Amino acid sequence: MYLHGGPESQSRASFNPLLQFLLNQGYAVTAPNFRGSTGYGKSYTHLDDVRKRLDAVKDVVSLVDWLKQDPAIDTSKIALLGGSYGGFLTLAAISHYPDLWAAAIDIVGMSSLRTFIQTTSPWRKRLREIEYGTVEQDGDFFDLIDPLNHADEITAPLLVFHGVNDPRVPIGESEQIVSKLKQRGHPVTYHRMEGEGHKIVKPENEIYVYSLVAAFLEKYMGCD
């Protein structure tokens, strides 16, 4: 299950090399446009704003129920893959609904909206506060939902990538949840991507990441 970033973006029927790679490996891929995605009108785009954040996670969970209706899908082997905000949704889903997932892959995702708002680049802070809320007014809500605060609930093995030079989602977002998971001996693999930022753009690094994703999914899910 591929969860796009943004959140005010959308998955469309266009070429995505990573998803095509997974399809070539034999995996079925679903790419939902959960609440907050663009392309469905302004009202839909704002259905996840601030304290409605977990409603988008509920959409991801509802997709699992929909997949269960397809006998060709083995719903005991569902993995989540998301980058940036999609990474946050991935971490939120595996920490708030831990029993649904066989594995998860987080690429430059936020593990805490509180620390993300506090550390993101100043030129982005105000824009992100409109979407997520402010620490001053919504910090209690952040503390309630942040995956970092529910890390002990995670059961799915986790693979994490983060660019060292990311100006949007500071690398500390990945390192703090990886540290928590390692402290309790949870299966988590973390790769600091030197010379990369918010996106992995160097061809050699893309190949490296794709190969690691394939090995990770094969280890924890397999593909019949």
Image (cartoon, rainbow, N blue to C red):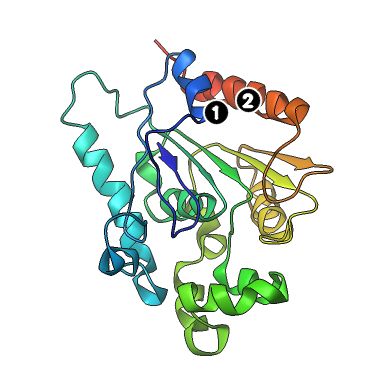
Secondary structure category for the residue under label 2: helix
**Residue appearing at x 37%, y 38% in the figure:** 31
Q: Position of residue 106 (x, y in %)?
A: 57, 44
Residue 69, placed above or below residue 185:
above
- Judge the density around disc 2: few (<14), some (14-19), many (≥20) Cα neighbours within 10 Å: some
For the C terminus, the image quarter is top left
- Quarter holding residue 161: top right
Which comes before the other along the chain, label 2 or label 1? 1
Looking at the picture, which amino acid does disc 2 mark?
Answer: Tyr
Left or right: residue 92 versus residue 174 is left
**Residue appearing at x 33%, y 28% in the figure:** 76
Q: Position of residue 120 (x, y in %)?
A: 68, 69
Secondary structure category for the residue under label 1: helix
Task: From the viewer's side, name the closer residue of 80 and 208.
Answer: 208
Q: Which residue is mark 2?
A: 210
Task: From the viewer's side, name the closer residue of 63 and 49.
Answer: 49
Q: Residue furthest left?
A: 69
For the N terminus, the image quarter is top left
Left or right: residue 199 versus residue 17 is right
Q: Which residue is mark 1?
A: 18
